[in-house]
Amino acid sequence: MGKLYIVPTPIGNLGDITLRALEILKSVDVILAEDTRKTAFLLKHFEIQKPISSHHKFNEHKTAESWAESISGTQSVALVTDAGTPAISDPGYLLVRACIKKNVEIETLPGATAFVPALVNSGLPCEKFVFEGFLPPKKGRQKRLKELANEERTMIFYESPFRLLKTLNEFRNFFGEERPVSVSREITKIYAETQRGTLSDVIGFYKDKEVKGEIVIIVGGKIKVKKEKNNNSKNVE
């Protein structure tokens, strides 16, 4: 029987790829890629020559079952995305699920993902957090923001540079202008940048700036207010 390997790839700096990831990419029969051009560039950089097939959000519903069938035979396959770990706000979940149904062995390698360095670098509590990824662009967006307004854990979002300011303003409307936030972009790249402060502060920073690169937004959770017994005063935890 074949095997499916989930292989994280660098989110910017190619030096962040692991030795084991390179070994797997060299050993498999075929590599499934979100964007074959970007994966071809990665493979060329590390002098790896393997067949590449397209597997992205627009075709994964149609191809997941057929690839699972192929892997259940004798084919070994590595799944990669443009950057980071497959299935984390990227294609991958459907193929993993299809392989599980066919009792195909799956091995997920540890590696790069954008939200972990952004979370640690934010200075906000890391012991408990909720990963939201990309918010719904339209339907369900307002409802989700209302629900998250009372979330006490640190919240993690992905966003495009074109919608950054709009999203920050929505956060300010739902979470309050004093809610702490950290915005990281271009993580591991030459122009990596992190801006921290209140939502009001960070909106002011980006208001008149042209923003580029992939973005991770870390928002502090709602501060829990504890009422003391037999006392009208309140303590903030």
Image (spheres, grey):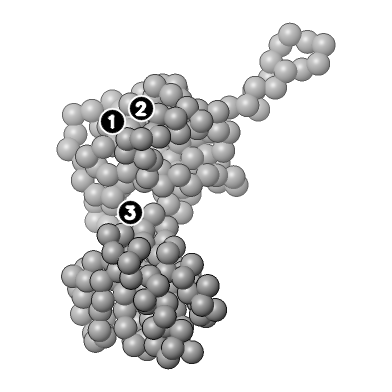
Nearest the viewer among 183 and 35 is 35
- Left or right: residue 73 compared with residue 105: left
Residue at left offset 18%, top offset 29% = 208
Q: Secondary structure at mark 2?
A: helix
Q: Quadrant of the C terminus?
A: top right
- Rendered view: 101 above or below 184: below
- Rendered view: 140 above or below 42: above
Sort mark 2 into few (<14), some (14-19) or many (20+) by Cα contacts within 10 Å. Answer: some
Q: Say whether marks 2 and 1 touch (CB < 8 Å).
A: yes
Q: CA distance from mark 2 to mark 1?
A: 6 Å
Residue at left offset 22%, top offset 39% = 162
Q: Name the quadrant containing residue 160.
A: top left
- Residue 19 pos. (x, y %): 40, 80
Q: Amino acid at mark 3?
A: Ile
Q: Amino acid at mark 1?
A: Lys
- Residue 152 pos. (x, y %): 58, 33
Sort mark 1 into few (<14), some (14-19) or many (20+) by Cα contacts within 10 Å. Answer: few
Q: CA distance from mark 1 to mark 3?
A: 21 Å
Residue that mark 3 sits on:
187
Pointer 2 or 3: first along the chain? 2
Q: Amino acid at mark 2?
A: Glu
Q: Secondary structure at mark 3?
A: loop
Residue at left offset 36%, top offset 76% = 66
* Figure disc tally: 3
* Numbered badge on residue 135: none
- Rendered view: 60 above or below 20: above
Residue that mark 2 sits on:
170
